[in-house]
Amino acid sequence: MSTETIRVTLPQETIEQYEAQAKARGNHPAEWLMSERLRLFAAANSQKPIVVDDTSRQKIEKIAGRNISSVEELVTLIENAVSVRVDDMEIPMTPQLLSRLNSRCIGMEFEKFLPPLIKRLLEEYAGLR
């Protein structure tokens, strides 16, 4: 792969941030870190990109009980966190709904609370109750 050198004008504060981060990652020059970041995010064609720093990622991993290495893994984690599986059917729910349902399964495990509730409500809907 061929490479080219480009010139970029940046505020001094931004350059200082890159210098500090590059130094912390092995005493590299700021240009090295800038080049790494530009390559990493070159394919991110997004109007509202979200970058999760290491501290936030570690908090998410602790909550989830698993490591996250990619945006795909993060999206899958969130999809699983806000859905309920009944037999082979996945039912997406909002976090607010899941929270409310959790608050109503007093004295019962959530996994045991939800299936009979869903069944009863479907029977009511179908006119069987």
Image (cartoon, rainbow, N blue to C red):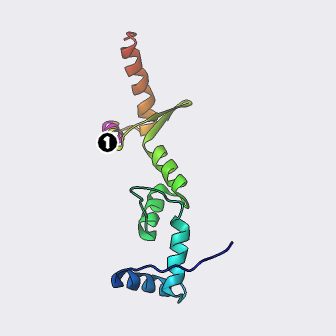
Q: Position of residue 30 (x, y in %)?
A: 48, 85
Q: Quadrant of residue 19?
A: bottom left
Image position of 15 with respect to 109: above or below: below
Up/down of 111 relative to 27, above or below? above
Q: At 49% across and 78% down in the image, what residue appears?
A: 34
Q: Is residue 44 above or below residue 128?
A: below
Residue shown at the point (49%, 54%) measured from the top left: 74
Circle 1 is placed at which residue position?
96
Question: What residue range appears in magenta?
Answer: 98-104
State the quadrant of the N terminus: bottom right
Q: Position of residue 68 (x, y in %)?
A: 53, 60
Question: Residue 71 magenta-drawn?
Answer: no
Side of 2 where 66 appears, left or right: left
Q: Nearer the viewer, residue 83 or 124?
A: 83
Q: Where is residue 52 drawn, in percent x and y?
A: 43, 64
Indicate whether 117 appears above or below 1. Answer: above
Q: Please indicate whether residue 110 sits to the left or right of residue 33 in the image.
A: left
Furthest residue in direction top, as rendered? 127
Could you say which quadrant of the image residue 125 lies in?
top left
Secondary structure, mark 1, is helix
The kind of residue tagged 1 is: Gln
Please state the horizontal and vertical placement of residue 100, each as a whole percent of the image.
30, 39
- Extreme residue toward the right, this view: 1
| 17, 8: nearer the viewer | 8
Q: Is residue 101 magenta?
A: yes
Assign the magenta stretch its main secondary structure.
Answer: helix
